[in-house]
Structure formats: structure tokens, C-alpha cells
């Protein structure tokens, strides 16, 4: 059993993964502190005044780890989950296009289809480039050709990331973006075939009740309330005396500190101050995410009845994605015979400002313009949430900055992990985050090496 005193900042999936593993290994001297009044972090859920349940954006539960699967089963039990077939679409040209769009070009208007195929043929004629792309913009052009890049990939990615693709690296891509195979594209066009089987999450599980947040409340329940201090903020960390100071005046001593709060917010709280680390941490870039939930009267329209989520590359709507959240669980609406729900996500950054005052109205207008809803009278409830830290942006120089920050913190026995603790988008989903917490505890208590954070590609291969 460990005799180390461990303090964990943040009760999101990473902090809960760390706490769960500590308890499993028989440790007793650990505490999880969170500024929010309940556990879950970005994976929390909310019920609005009209009784609609919302997540902070479309959270799809899938896994690269057997350990994660076991924890999920233990948390909600076999009977606690719905299992869904992914049905993803894009809405463009006023049409529904099955996702990934590049494999379903037959749904495009003829001119656009020809433009996309021409771009792919030109790529083929040109042959592979001698030099690798230096950013995401170049990677898009080299992988999708000029047509698909202009029609879908560039506008869509700007809407998601809120930064121009040229500002992003492409090392995070891995399994996340379906790349293009001209033979397959042409086959599907000529044989008029829909082609939707792609990627890691073609089936996914979702809690029957209570949204994504119910998972993490259940995990916290397995750990035990005595290990949590909720509604209390970490205000400073004295790494010389190994003390975490809290907003309620308490000071918690630690031998190791696992922090899951945004690392660019942690570093300014640290004494002694390190100018090199501070400077590097301030270079990390993030975008914000605005969620607008629309609670809707009536039965789910037939064309929406089996859809999971829809991508929006065009300017007709402010959001880049809408999830038919009532399709994930009927319990998300007050009465499934009378209501259904849509949850939209709109990204924001200094490069892509959002007018908060008009966002709900813009979202409703966008839902009408794209045919998601037929009339504004259907909207019986609106719910909004702004996550200042939504996406950890994989900028071209991200890894250079992280290399200055994370090892320097570890030299002070501070292990910064998770979506914004470690800032690696490619390993920043719920499963990755929880496992970053588990793996760092294994390292601290058992001396085993971490995999997820140092080797994202290995983690994403799902070797169990
Ligand atoms: C729009 C959107 C869509 C997503 N979709 C998916 C998806 O489909 N599938 C999936 O698996 N994942 C998805 N995610 C990611 C998922 O939300 C994260 O993987 C997960 O919540 C990260 O966990 P974490 O513990 O690292 O960080 P967080 O969940 O951010 O938790 C960090 C915690 O630290 C606390 N904290 C911060 N500062 C302090 C302080 N000073 N003192 C005390 N506490 C503090 C916060 O209150 C918070 O609770 C999505 C995220 C977003 C934003």
C-alpha cells in the first residue's frame, strides 16, 4: 500500500481515473479537489428548467482500453447502457450527405462532384510529394485534393477549430480523419453506393439515464465521498513546501500532485516562479465551445429519427455540429412522445469571435436554414453553456511548448494530465483522459511507464 500523500486537482475523468486507481491499489491518503460543485468536469450533464437533459457537446462513449471498459461496466452496470450504431451526416448544398463525405460524393451536385474528383485525379498525377506537409492546411490539400479541400475540409475545420488549418499541426490526425482512396470514391460514385463504415466509433455506448455526467457521478460513487472536496478552488501551489492552497483557506500537503486543470492556468499559481515554464505555458492555444441545446415540441421528424450527429461546413448555421440528443436516450426529454432535442456546438477563439448576445437566435435561424427544424414555434426550451476551455488546439509548435512545461513540473512532483492538463487533443477524450489518470498513478505507485500521453498513436491503436 502507498504511503504517498496524493492531491488531485480536478474531478473530471482524469482526476477520477487517478482516484479510482489509487483506491484500487489500496491507497487511502488521497484527495480530489474541484472548483465545481459536482464531479465530471467537461463530461458533466445538466437538466434545464423544462426537464431536457444536456451534455457539454456531443459526448460519444467509446474506448481504446479494456481497463476503461471494465470501469464503465462497473459504474453503470451492463443494463445501464444503450448501444448505438453511429449514423453521422453532413448537411451541405441543402442536402443530407452521409459521412465521411469524401466516400459519398454521389450526393453532391454534379459540378461539385466533378471538382472533387478532379482534385483527387490531379493529386494522383502529381504523385507523392518529396516533403511532408508542414501544417494541417497543406496536409488537407495533399490528402483530399483542391476540390474536397475547398468544399468541405477547409471550411469545416475552420468552423471546428476556430483557427485557420495553417496554424495547426497534422500529427494529431491518426484515426480521426478518414483519408481519401480514389478507387473507393469512384466505386461509390459509379455504383451509387453509400459508404459509411469508417473509423473507431462506428458503434458507441451511451448511458440510459442522466447523460454523460451520470457515468462520472457513478465512478465518484465507487471512490467514496470522503475523498472529495467539491466547490473549492485551488488558488496557489507552493512546490517548495509541497502545499496546495485552497479558496476555503485550507492548505493540503502532498508528496505528489496530479493536476488536471488547464496547465496554462496552473503555472501562474506556482511558487517558486519559473519564467521559462511560464512563457511556454502561455503559448499553448485553446478554443472555447458554445453549446446551445434546443428542446423541441413534437415527434422526432422521420428524416432525423436515426441520425446521431450532423456536421455543418457551410455558413448557413453558426454551429459545426448538431447532435440529435434525444436519439441517444429518450430520457433526455421530458416526454419522448411529445418532445425531441438537438444539441449544437459553436467554436470560438480570437480568430473566430462569437456574439454571445445573439448566439441562441443565430442557432435557431441556422437550424431553420439547414432544415433541422421546420418552425421556430417548435422550440420550447433553449439551454446554453460556454466552455472557455473546449478544445486543446494542436498548433504547429504545441509539442515544443509542452516539452518545456510538463517535464519541468514533474521535476517538482507535479504531474499535469488530462485534456487541458497535458493539452494533447489526440488523447483528450474521456477514455484517454481517465487512462492518463490511471497510468500516472501506476507510475507513481508501481513504477510502470505511461503509454497514453507519451505514445498517443499506440494508445489509439487500441492495443489492450
Ligand atoms: C464539445 C466537446 C465535445 C466532446 N466530445 C467528446 C466525445 O464525443 N467523446 C469523449 O470521450 N470525449 C469528448 N469530449 C472530451 C471530454 O469532455 C474530456 O475527455 C474530459 O472531460 C476531460 O477530462 P479531464 O478530467 O482531463 O478534464 P475536465 O473534464 O476539463 O476536468 C477538469 C476539472 O478541473 C477543475 N478545475 C479547473 N481549475 C481548477 C482549480 N483552480 N481548482 C479546482 N478545480 C479546478 C474543473 O472544474 C474540472 O472539473 C468532448 C469535450 C468537449 C468540450
Image (cartoon, helix red, strand yellow):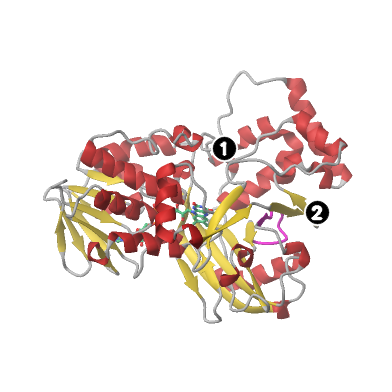
434, above or below 296, in the image:
above
Residue 424 appears in the rendering: no
Quadrant of residue 243 in the image? Answer: bottom left
Q: Secondary structure at mark 2?
A: loop
Instruction: Look at discs 1 and 2 and give the one toward the viewer.
Output: 1
Furthest toward the left, the residue is: 241
Q: Which residue is mark 1?
A: 175
Depth order, front residue of 437/217? 217
Identify the residue under disc 2: 93
- Which residue lies at the image location 50% right of the left edge and 61% below the top edge? 79
Label 1 – label 2 distance at C-alpha = 27 Å
Give residue 5's position: percent from left, percent from top. 16, 51
State which region is magenta. Answer: 309-318
User: Which quadrant holds the C terminus?
Assistant: top left
Residue 388 location (% of width, % of height): 45, 60
- Of residue 391 and residue 299, the one placed in the foreground of this image is 299
Amino acid at each position: 500500500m502507498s504511503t504517498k500523500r496524493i492531491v488531485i486537482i480536478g474531478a473530471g475523468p482524469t482526476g477520477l481515473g487517478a482516484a479510482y486507481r489509487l483506491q484500487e491499489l489500496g491507497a487511502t491518503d488521497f484527495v480530489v479537489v474541484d472548483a465545481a460543485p459536482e464531479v465530471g468536469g467537461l463530461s458533466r450533464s445538466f437538466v434545464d428548467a423544462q426537464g431536457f437533459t444536456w451534455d457539454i457537446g456531443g459526448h460519444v462513449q467509446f474506448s481504446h482500453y479494456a481497463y476503461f471498459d471494465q470501469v464503465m461496466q462497473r459504474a453503470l452496470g451492463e443494463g445501464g447502457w444503450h448501444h448505438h450504431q453511429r449514423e453521422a451526416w453532413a448537411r451541405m448544398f441543402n442536402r443530407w450527405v452521409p459521412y465521411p463525405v469524401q466516400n459519398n460524393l454521389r450526393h453532391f451536385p454534379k459540378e461539385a462532384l466533378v471538382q472533387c474528383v478532379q482534385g483527387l485525379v490531379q493529386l494522383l498525377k502529381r504523385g507523392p510529394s518529396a516533403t511532408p506537409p508542414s501544417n494541417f492546411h497543406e496536409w488537407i490539400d495533399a490528402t483530399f485534393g483542391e476540390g474536397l479541400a475547398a468544399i468541405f475540409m477547409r471550411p469545416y475545420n475552420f468552423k471546428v477549430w476556430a483557427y485557420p488549418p495553417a496554424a495547426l499541426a497534422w500529427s494529431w490526425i491518426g484515426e480521426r480523419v478518414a483519408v481519401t482512396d480514389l478507387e473507393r470514391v469512384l466505386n461509390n460514385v459509379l455504383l451509387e453506393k453509400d459508404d459509411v463504415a469508417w473509423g473507431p466509433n462506428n458503434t458507441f455506448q451511451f448511458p440510459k439515464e442522466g447523460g454523460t455526467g451520470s457515468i462520472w457521478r457513478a465512478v465518484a460513487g465507487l471512490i467514496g465521498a470522503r475523498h472529495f472536496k467539491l466547490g473549492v478552488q485551488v488558488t496557489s501551489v507552493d512546490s517548495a513546501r509541497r502545499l496546495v492552497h485552497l479558496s476555503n483557506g485550507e492548505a493540503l500537503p502532498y508528496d505528489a500532485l496530479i493536476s488536471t486543470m488547464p496547465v496554462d492556468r496552473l503555472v501562474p499559481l506556482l511558487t517558486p516562479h519559473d519564467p521559462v515554464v511560464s512563457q511556454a505555458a502561455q503559448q499553448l492555444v485553446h478554443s472555447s465551445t458554445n453549446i446551445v441545446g434546443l428542446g423541441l415540441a413534437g415527434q422526432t421528424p422521420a428524416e432525423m429519427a436515426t441520425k446521431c450527429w450532423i456536421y455543418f461546413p457551410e455558413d448557413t448555421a453558426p454551429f459545426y455540429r448538431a447532435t440529435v440528443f434525444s436519439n441517444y436516450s429518450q430520457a433526455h426529454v421530458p416526454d419522448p412522445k411529445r418532445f425531441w432535442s438537438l444539441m449544437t456546438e459553436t467554436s470560438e477563439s480570437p480568430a473566430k469571435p462569437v456574439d454571445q448576445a445573439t448566439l441562441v437566435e443565430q442557432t435557431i435561424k441556422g437550424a431553420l436554414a439547414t432544415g433541422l427544424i421546420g418552425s421556430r414555434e417548435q422550440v420550447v426550451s433553449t439551454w446554453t453553456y460556454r466552455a472557455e476551455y473546449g478544445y486543446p488546439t494542436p498548433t504547429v509548435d504545441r509539442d515544443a511548448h509542452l516539452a518545456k512545461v510538463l517535464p519541468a513540473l514533474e521535476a517538482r512532483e507535479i504531474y499535469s494530465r488530462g485534456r487541458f492538463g497535458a493539452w494533447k487533443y489526440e488523447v483528450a477524450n474521456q477514455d484517454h483522459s481517465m487512462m492518463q489518470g490511471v497510468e500516472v498513478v501506476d507510475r507513481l505507485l508501481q513504477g510502470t511507464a505511461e503509454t497514453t500521453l507519451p505514445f498517443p498513436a499506440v494508445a489509439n491503436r487500441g492495443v489492450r
